[in-house]
Amino acid sequence: MSSVIESIETLLVDLPTIRPHKLSMTTMACQTLVIVRLRDSDGIEGLGEGTTIGGLAYGPESPESIKRNIDAYLAPLLIGQPAGAVATLRARLDRHARGNAIAKSALETALLDAQGKRLGLPVAELLGGVRHDHLPVLWTLASGDTARDIDEAFQRLEQRRHCDFKLKIGANAVDDDVRHVAAIKQALGERASVRVDVNQAWDESTAVRGIAALQAAGIDLIEQPIPAREQAGLVRLANRFEVPMLADEAVADARDGFALAAAGFNGAYALKIAKAGGPRGALALAQVAQAAGIGLYGGTLLEGTIGTAASLHAWATLPELAWGSEMFGPLLLKEDIVAEPLAYGEFGVALPTGPGLGVALDEDKLAHFTRK
Ligand code: MUC
Ligand code: MG
């Protein structure tokens, strides 16, 4: 008889960050991962991760709601079902539960990991096949201190870890933010690409002023300057400036991507498995973007190794990431819960090999960092 899903366990895992990470809406000193352990009747275990930023500061799902909603509503929809029917099971989750994209992403990841292990194939092979086994990864400078950010950037360049940098702005007055960004760009010069993420903090007129100054300072990409729902405003900004706009919170899945492209947006899209309800949904958005001639960027919600690996397996199948990726989440964490870390180097990261995600848990560390 074919394998069925026997149990789904969810764990809240609190990990300290290497330094405070300042975004427009919150400052993180710790990251909470929701780890999913899905066990099938043939003894195979699938791992998944659902992670967000700053409790409820980033979006409508918190780590606690992700865990609770999986336990109470989503897991019961999967228990007893055929384990390998990933597409059917994922559709079942959408039919019976609205929203909760991060929780669904964690479960889809666990289903894919288990199925890959069952078939002896990496998740990327289940998603269409590997086109790139080393992906570019930028670093986010967000210590809140200009001199410390410049030091950090030079360190990363010297280590050949990262050569593109994203700066988190929007928490301070625009003029202060522009001064901070321009100082970093001036210090790095042509050695690095410098981009900013405003995380929705500006209104449109503030954005016009801020973006004009950032463009003049040589910034390469402006991420989500205005609120997610102001799609018309984002289209206006994209058409007004030469420096491209990167839509992040404004574009979660393929439908959002279609609407924004149809409205005349000509920037780039940040793909995130967490926004799209899993790797498959993120790739569906990628296909819409490709059809519309919109460039892609591999995004993160600062996941740990499991969520980052799941994203890498998806991005590895794409023909091109015009803006690279930001799959650095594990590097922001002081501690990890996996046996082998991802292999970062040469300004990127290697796609993990081995069946499924290619990631194994370190049970001692997991037990130590799991919330009691
Ligand atoms: C975001 O909005 O892009 C990605 C990198 C980072 O530092 O925060 C995230 C979220
Ligand atoms: Mg962003």
Image (cartoon, helix red, strand yellow):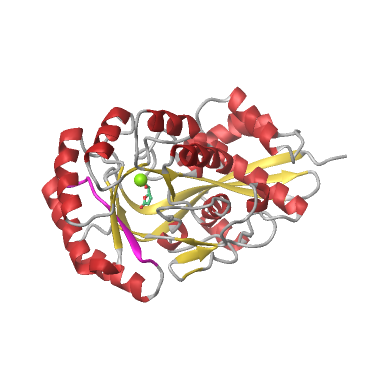
Q: Quadrant of residue 87?
A: top right
Q: Nearer the viewer, residue 359 or 317?
A: 317
Can see residue 66? no
As for residue 112 lying within the magenta part, the answer is no
Left or right relative to 310: residue 112: right
In the rendered image, residue 161, in percent from the top left (x then y), is placed at 41, 69
In the rendered image, residue 3, in percent from the top left (x then y), is placed at 81, 41
Location of residue 230 with respect to 278 vertically, above or below? above
Residue displayed at 34% across by 62% down: 164
Residue displayed at 16% across by 53% down: 216
Q: Nearer the viewer, residue 365 or 164?
A: 164
Location of residue 139 with respect to 86 vertically, above or below? below
- Chain part drawn in magenta: 162-172
Left or right relative to 347: residue 120: right
Q: How many marks?
A: 0
Can see residue 254? yes
Q: Residue furthest left?
A: 175
Q: Quadrant of residue 352?
A: bottom right
Location of residue 234 with respect to 106 vertically, above or below? above
Residue displayed at 53% across by 37% down: 277
Residue displayed at 56% across by 49% down: 314
Left or right relative to 39: residue 228: left
Left or right relative to 23: residue 313: right
In the rendered image, residue 104, in percent from the top left (x then y), is placed at 56, 36
Rendered-image quadrant of the N terminus: top right
In the rendered image, residue 361, in percent from the top left (x then y), is placed at 61, 59
Q: Residue furthest right?
A: 1
As for residue 166 lying within the magenta part, the answer is yes
